[in-house]
Image (tube, coloured by chain):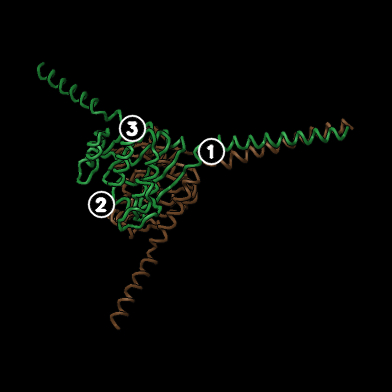
Chain colours: A brown, B green
Amino acid sequence: MPVMWTVKVVGLGVVALSLSLELLIWLIRRLRPGRALNEVLFFPSEIACVEHIFTPPSPYSCVCSLPHGVETSFSRLLRHLLSATSSLDLCVFAFSNMDLCRAVLVLHSRGVTVRVLTDKDYAAITGSQIGVLRKAGICVRCDVGSVYMHHKFAVVDDQLLITGSLNWTLTAVQSNMENVLITKEPELVRPFIKEFHRLWLHNDPARYLSSVDQKLAHVFTRASD
Amino acid sequence: MPVMWTVKVVGLGVVALSLSLELLIWLIRRLRPGRALNEVLFFPSEIACVEHIFTPPSPYSCVCSLPHGVETSFSRLLRHLLSATSSLDLCVFAFSNMDLCRAVLVLHSRGVTVRVLTDKDYAAITGSQIGVLRKAGICVRCDVGSVYMHHKFAVVDDQLLITGSLNWTLTAVQSNMENVLITKEPELVRPFIKEFHRLWLHNDPARYLSSVDQKLAHVFTRASD
């Protein structure tokens, strides 16, 4: 009988051990889903060719005069953006950087759902890429309710947050002191997803125009009283 | 004998359970050191009186016409700033908000080591509080090497990061769409501490003036050749 009991105890031990291991793995995954991605980029970025990021099979085939094969803050930013596979929600004050515009267009052509929210005044300035995005069929909404829609954040695939002081302009990337924080920390990503959703609905032209219609109807009703 | 074995198995189970619990608590503490603080604030902030944040014993003694006892994005930001007990490193493009200036002055008067790095052009505009900070004896340095020193971040006690799109102005707080991210995540805080240190040394007037002296000496040497 003691032999049988020993077998049972050893069996119980093996089961306990495997359960503990499973619990451990589950805990690590549960508690640290975004541990692999907490990154900070500082600008101005070193100026280098980014052609190989858009056309990966030919890293040195570009013949421009810029340095090639150099990893910079800007190339890191582009890589994070281009990692999108399902959605990109972009909420940015000034958008005139042509490489960033190209990245957004590439994502759109790949079938990624792109939504862009921007400032009403800066959308119309010379060099703004907002018109280019609109022409390509990307859904763009302009903020109408505040002095400035001053955000500079993007949410990739509802799980990766890119935020900071950097406007999407050439000056910001190449000349200013700027920061961009990249994280998958759910406690930080979730509020930005929620805020984007709120602002997106708030600046729905249909809603806005309907509100204008109601005001006009009210004016006409009062005028006819 | 089977009774003794049962006692042993139950004992083993209790030990395994207590060990698992200890492991669980250790894991939670080890994997989530900054879990207690990951916060995102959105602006424009509701406008409310913040007097009780500066003078805590009298929450409703202020007689101004603003709403009292309301927790807003701005009051949260002030509380995080005022939590500093040893140091505040501030790196901000535009600083004209008088409540934020008051908070920095309060910290300075409490003996907190305050260092302010700001943009050379915006430091001199009407309404800038940089002169007030300097007059109070706070060490301020202006960035001289970039088009804009466009950062808007603060590091409290070398462990709490406050960063985002928000300049320290009244318009940004009360009228713009803005975000401020607050975290103790070491992987995010550390790079900002390092960058502040780099910029602080880089913009040391002594170093800058010495470099100007060297250039002048070089000019004079060449002129006398």
Residue A126 appears in the picture as rendered: yes
Residue A97 appears in the picture as rendered: no
The residue beneath circle 1 is B32
Of B137 and A143, which appears nearest the observer? B137
Cα gap from disc 3 to disc 1, whole angstroms: 28 Å
Q: Say what secondary structure mark 1 lies in.
A: loop
Query: Looking at the picture, which amino acid does disc 2 mark?
Result: Thr
Label 2 crowd bin: few (<14), some (14–19), many (20+), radius 10 Å: few
Q: Quadrant of the N terminus of chain A?
A: top right
Residues marked 3 and 1 touching at CB (< 8 Å): no
**Protein chain holding label 2:** A
What numbered label is drawn on residue A126?
A: 2
Q: Say what secondary structure mark 2 lies in.
A: loop
The residue beneath circle 3 is B113
Query: Looking at the picture, which amino acid does disc 1 mark?
Result: Arg
Query: Looking at the picture, which amino acid does disc 3 mark?
Result: Thr
Of B62 and B150, which appears nearest the observer? B62
Q: Quadrant of the C terminus of chain A?
A: bottom left
